[in-house]
Structure formats: C-alpha cells, structure tokens
Image (tube, helix red, strand yellow):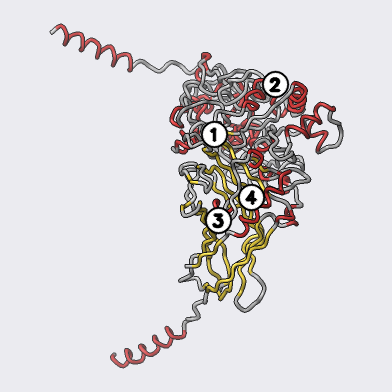
Amino acid sequence: MKSYFYFLLPLLLLIVSCEDDDDPVSTEAELSIAFRGEFGEDDLAIQSATYDYPTGEQLKVLLFQYYLSDLELLPADGGDAVRLSDIELIRWMSATEGPVATKTYTVPTGDYQGIRFGLGVKPELNAQDPNNSPADGTLNENEFWNASARYVFAKIEANADMEGDGVFDTPLTYHMGSDALYTTITFTQDFSLDGSNDPQLTIISDVLAALSDGNNTFDISDADQQRVHGGNQAIASDIWNRLANQFELEVR
Amino acid sequence: MQRILVVLALAILFFSASCEPDPPISCDTCPEEPVDRAISGPSTPLDYSLEVPDYLPAPILDEANPLTVEGIELGRRLFYDKIMGRDSAFACADCHQQDKAFTDGRALAAGIDGRLGTRSTMSIVNLAFNPNGFHWDGAFGKLWEQAIHPVENMLEMDEDWENVLIRLRRSDDYPERFRAAFGISRTSEITQELAVKAIAQFEMTIISADSHFDRVVYQNSEFFTEEEQLGADSLFFVEDVPVGTLHPGCGHCHNAPSFGDNRFKNNGLDAVSSLDDFSDKGLGEVSGSRFDNGKFRTPTLRNIALTAPYMHDGRFATLEEVLDHYAAGGHGVENEDPNITGFSLNDRQKAALLAFLKSLTDESLIEDSRFSSPFE
C-alpha cells in the first residue's frame, strides 16, 4: 500500500507542475490620472472659499474648466505615443465637488518618459458642429460659441468683491478659445507602469496662476477686462498664455 | 370620570371611523372583478427609433427603458387619462397642455381641486436631450422616476399609487396594453414602475425642432425678418463685441439648437442678503449645499412665446418683463451666475429680441396628433 503512495506522490507532483503555470503576465494597466484644481496654495473650492487676489480684491470662483485633446503617454523607448483620449473636458463647477477629478484609462505596461496633451479642442474636432456629439457628449453645444468662433477651450468665472465690503457683486467671465490658441503641453518625467505598484499621476492647474504669474497680474478692476468672450481674444490670449504655462505634473 | 368617558367616546369614534370601508374608487369603465387575471393578446413590443432632425444632437436614451411603439402608445394614454389622479379626476395633461407647449399658462401649477403648487409647470419638450436630471431642481435622475411623484403629490394629482394600480388592473383596456408594451401575463404584474416607464417613453418622443428659427437656420427654407435677424445676431447670440461692451448674450446659457443648457444657476431673481434666505432653495434642497440655494434649471427657450408666465415661480407674466429682469443685471448675490451682468436695451433692440424669441415657436408641435389626446 505504501508503495502506491510513493508512486502516486511523484505523479501528483508531476501533474501539478505540468499545469499551465504560465500566469498571463498582464500587459495592460489601469492608469488613473488625477486632475487637481488649485487657487494659489489652496485647493480649488468652488464658491465656498474666498481667495485673495494679488491686487487686493477677493474672489469666489464659480467655474473653472478646460478642454484637453490627444492626452498621450510618451514611451521611454521613443516609440509611438499611447493615446489615452481624443478629448476631455476637465471642469469644476459645484461646491459639492472636491478639488480632484479623476479619469481612468487602460494603457500598456512599460516604461514611460512623460505625458503630453493639447490644451483646447484640437482643430479637427474644433471644426465639428455640436450636433455631431450626443446631448451629453464632451463636445456638446453648451461649450460652443457659434459657427465661426467654434468651441470655448477654457472658462474661468468668478464673482469678485472689489471694494472690500464683503459683497461679491462684480462678475468676471473669461472665455477663451480659437485654433490659434491651441497649445501642446509636454511633461518629461520618467515613470513605469506594471499594473501593481503604479505611480499616481496628477495634473495640477492653478486658477490664480492663469491670472497672475507673480510678475504680471491680470487687471480685474478694469471694467473692460471683466468680461472676455469670443471677440476679445487679444485680452484672452494674455490669460491663455499663463494658463498654458502653469500646468504641473506630479508623479508619486 | 367625565373626562374618562369623553376620551373613551372619542376613541370609539376614532376607531369606528377608521374602520369604515374605503370610499369606492371612481372609474366608470372599470368592471368589478378580481384584481389578478390572466391577460391575453400580443406581447412582443416593436422597437421604436426616435425621429431626430440631424441638426439636433443625438438623444440620451435610457437603457433601462427602451422605447417601443406599444410602450409609447400606452404612455400617451396614461398621460392623458384622468384615471391617474385622485378619484380618476386629474391627468398629467391637465398641467402639461399641448397648445401651450405642454405648460398650463399659470404662474404656479394648479393640481386637483385647484390646489396651487410652489413652482411653475415645466414644458416637457426635448427631454430626450437633457443630461442633468429632471425637474426645476434636478431632483430626479431618470425621466420615469420623475413621473412617480406628481401622482402622489397632494398639490398635484394627490392619489395613492395603489389606487391607480387597482384601476389600471381592473380596466378593460389597460391590461392588454401593458402586455403589449412590456410582455406581462397577469394584471398583478402591472406596476408603478411600468406605468411611469410608459409615460416616460411617450414624453421622450415629444421633440420640438420645427420652428421658424429651424427653418431659417437649419432647413434653409425661410428667411429671418430684419428684426429677427437683429435679435439673433446682435443680441441673442452675440459674442464678438467690443471690449467692455455689455450685451445680453442669452446664448451663453440658451445656446442653439437646444436653447437651454439644463444646468442649474442662480439667475439673479432674488435680492437675498444671505444664501440661506431663498424661499425656494431649488438645487440646494437637492444637493444639500447652501451654495446651490436659489439655483434652478436653465430651461429651453423653444416655444417660449407659448409658455408664459416665466421663471420657476412664474413671477414674470410676459417676455418683456423677463428681458427687463436680465437687463437690470441681478442683485449681486455671491452665487449668481457671473454671466448675469445687466445691459442696456433700447426699444428697437427689445422688439428685435422679442421677435427672435418668438421665432422659436414650433407651430407643428401644438398640432401634432402624435402628442395629442388619444381620447378625443
């Protein structure tokens, strides 16, 4: 009887070891990218926070949003960029939302040297009309100016207390967009994705930095600069350039 | 002792009153028969594809409530049938009247017995394109969920759903229609959920997109008058204006082709001293955030000439009053939408803007037999 045992044991081991131990090595990872809104040193809090403006006024931010086109990862070996999304609308518009909006993408595992996106709606999509988008689609009519001006690439809206009386009764609306403003932003930073201990990528955008870079501060007290919409893109460019230059990538 | 007797007598009175049989349910055509019976007849509903002009975006369809020919027809009947209200005396269509673009012409909705609600009846056109919940305050995520509450609301139809279901199950017509729409086999399977889903299916089909504006801009079959053109290009859709110029720019929130972004905003109606002081908190009541107090849906302006009075509480009787309100520029409340800034509007401009707004009336909507009462 014991001999059967000694016969069966190696057989069992053989069978077990012959099982397909080829655990599939995952070639894809779920990558979550956090988009964090800030106002200076603070997290962006829609309506509920009161922010100091460099020229002495105070602001309550009601809306901050921007489009991203062609969000891509850049492989370390210099190969073709990995497209995460053709178009995204990143938006903060409610006091009930936190400062971080997260989007998740399935990407190939591997080594990467950076991330890239276009700030705004890329020309080929900007040429499309909103009726090509579902009513709840990213490129719906609510972000569309008209047939000639096309999509609004970014919006900053706030109510300001200009007199220091605690009354936020001066509306500020900055709507920017045109093919000429479309800007490609590239971050170079090495990171690896293996599907298990992946780093957290956070793209940070700062409303204050879009209005003031420390040297130049957009003059919100000028009544001519409190509403910047389609026709005032010369002024909008001033904000846009700071907006495009202030993005940061954090990899942890 | 006397006090004890009084209490005893009151208690007996109370219990005897509550033991009285419920009043009969009024329904002339409802035979008295067992609540549950087998239903025969066709039970394979036909898929229905919404007819949407190519200048509108793709509709937002509810996978949990696919449109069918039979479901839509059932919903249409339920929408117009007073069987849905208390004592079979009030229908959805009593407030949502087709000739008024499915509003009622009242400042505040008037329910059964003329009971006044707290808000104005909303138009129910183009709900298929609404991504942001339903009702003035977005309280209901799905259209069919919204349809539950008017039946129960004591200021609207004031009925117990159980009574409605008894009437529907006893009807000599509805069980077969429910079977045709949802494939059920017994009357006991007629539920609140199926009833409101049918109503929602009908409401989804009410698409309004054949106004003079549509025929000018999208169909190229008509022309704007000079006045309408001024209202459209220089006032309503205006963006490209000189630096610092104040302008109406209604299109910020009411952009074409939907003419309403369905987002929630404080549009400057009330001069409250604190965000806590709004008499109707609107979105704030739903979200629980005081910063959302006083915010209401931006509705479509399609058929606006038919849907007076205006605003969530019907405070403005005319479109002229609405324009005066926006021209005045709100009250500087901290959560007011920053696009409410005020502007000047001379008589000519006001007439032009009104002419343009009237171009949004879809005359075919109010005549369309697909949306009218099936009982007439």
* In this picture, residue B2 sits left or right of residue A78: left
Residue at screen point 53% across, 26% down: B270
Which residue type does callout 2 highlight? Asp
- Corner quadrant of residue B8: top left
Front position among marks 3 and 1: 3
Q: CA distance from mark 4 to mark 3?
A: 21 Å
Q: CA distance from mark 1 to mark 2?
A: 41 Å
Q: Nearest the camera: B61 or B240?
A: B240
Whether residue A162 can be seen here: yes
Element under label 4? strand
Q: Quarter of the image for the N terminus of chain A: give it.
A: bottom left
- Corner quadrant of residue B325: top right
Which residue was labeled with disc 2? B99
Residue A214, label in figure:
3
Which residue type does callout 1 highlight? Asp
Residue A169, label in figure:
1
Which residue was labeled with disc 4? A154
Element under label 2? helix
Mark 2, other Cα within 10 Å: few <14 / some 14–19 / many ≥20: some
Instruction: Tell which residue pokes out farthest to the left in this image.
Output: B1
Chain letter for mark 4, please: A
Label 3 in the same subunit as label 1:
yes
- Corner quadrant of residue B39: top right
